[in-house]
Amino acid sequence: MQHRVFLLLALVTLLALTSAVAKKKDKVKKGGPGSECAEWSWGPCTPSSKDCGAGFREGTCGAQTQRIRCRVPCNWKKEFGADCKYKFESWGSCDGGSGTKARQGTLKKARYNAQCQETIRVTKPCTPKTKAKAKAKKGKGKD
């Protein structure tokens, strides 16, 4: 009985060690296959077709070049790229002259050493207020 327990314990230990080694190999692959380069410079994610979806990002480090898979979200803002992540404040009030409202964003994260602006300003058209909805609500309700 003690031999079975010992063998079972040895088997569990062996599985744990092989799992740890496999995780360590995965971490080494991210820096570059077989490379000891520390300063990788990554380019933008370029979609394989159209302007969004799955694609590739090319990185260089010295004389080495590597391509990794990436994905460009289809709702990304093209003015500042998919690799620049911003925290936005609330939308401002509607500017009657231009018919737009604006908000400002501050840089939260720059992925893959992307060159991002510290602050950006985005605009969108004002939504027209419809009186039809207000009239429709009058008919509903308690008398």
Image (cartoon, rainbow, N blue to C red):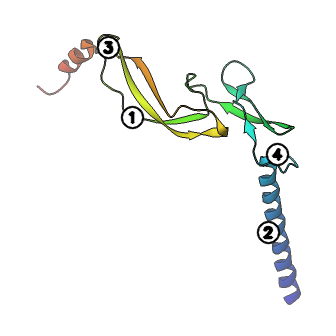
Q: Are marks 3 and 4 in contact (CB under 8 Å)?
A: no
**Dot 2 alpha-carbon crowd within 10 angstroms: few under 14, some 14 to 19, many 20 or more:** few
Q: Secondary structure at mark 4?
A: loop
Q: Are marks 2 and 1 in contact (CB under 8 Å)?
A: no
Q: Nearer the viewer, mark 2 or mark 4?
A: 4
Residues at marks 1 and 3, CA–CA distance in whole angstroms: 22 Å
Q: Which mark is residue 32?
A: 4
Q: Nearer the viewer, mark 1 or mark 3?
A: 1
Residue 43 or 101: which is nearer the viewer? Answer: 43
Q: Are marks 4 and 1 in contact (CB under 8 Å)?
A: no
Q: What's under tag 2, amino acid-wise?
A: Ala
The residue wearing badge 3 is 128
Q: Quadrant of the C terminus?
A: top left
The residue wearing badge 2 is 16
| Lateral position of residue 136 relative to residue 125, left or right | left
Q: Which mark is residue 89?
A: 1
Q: What's under tag 1, amino acid-wise?
A: Glu
Instruction: Point out the tag, 4 or 1, that comes first from the N-terminus.
Output: 4
Residues at marks 4 and 1, CA–CA distance in whole angstroms: 38 Å
Residues at marks 3 and 4, CA–CA distance in whole angstroms: 52 Å
Q: What's under tag 3, amino acid-wise?
A: Pro
Q: Nearer the viewer, mark 2 or mark 1?
A: 1
Q: Specify the farthest residue to the front.
A: 62
Residues at marks 3 and 2, CA–CA distance in whole angstroms: 62 Å
